[in-house]
Amino acid sequence: MLTILNAVQLVLYIALLALVGQGALYVLAGQRRESNVFYKLLQVVGKPFTWLVRRITPKQVSDKQVPIVTFCLLAVFYMVVTFERANLCVTQGLVGQPGCR
């Protein structure tokens, strides 16, 4: 179970970093961001998550707001997984083990 929680936390962390990077390039690159290779790469990494959020959000949420909503949802899921992982480590007595650091 600890391995699964670590894997889920890693996937969420990568997606969160991709969305943060995409937001930073959105601000820094301005209109030229669509031709930026790194922006496109970060879009590819975050696309499965933004696609899923676009499907579950109502149509009143604009496409420009979807990455922000995605980031907020992923941050909440990341915190939940982190707390569950810490709880598992404490209850199982695994504090100090490599997977619980």
Image: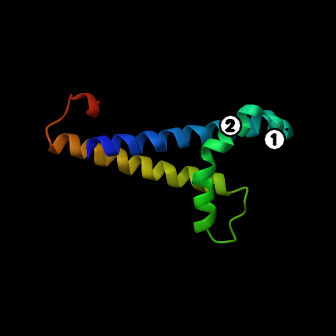
Instruction: Give the amino acid at mark 1.
Output: Glu
The earlier-in-sequence mark between 1 and 2 is 1
Relative to 11, say whether 54 is above or below.
below
- Residue in view at x 81 percent, y 41 percent: 34
Relative to 69, say whether 81 is above or below.
above
- Residue in view at x 66 percent, y 39 percent: 42
**Foreground pick, 58 / 49:** 49
**Foreground pick, 63 / 10:** 10
Residue ID for mark 2: 41
Picture coordinates of residue 96 (x, y %)?
21, 28
Q: Residues within 10 Å of mark 2 (few under 14, many from 20)?
A: few
- Residue in view at x 57 percent, y 49 percent: 71
- Residue in view at x 56 percent, y 37 percent: 17
Instruction: Give the amino acid at mark 2.
Output: Leu
Picture coordinates of residue 77 (x, y %)?
43, 52
Q: Where is residue 21, by image quadrant?
A: top right
Q: Where is residue 23, by image quadrant?
A: top right
Secondary structure, mark 2, is: helix
The label number, if any, that marks residue 34 in the structure image:
1
What distance separates the C-alpha of mark 1 from that of mark 2? 11 Å
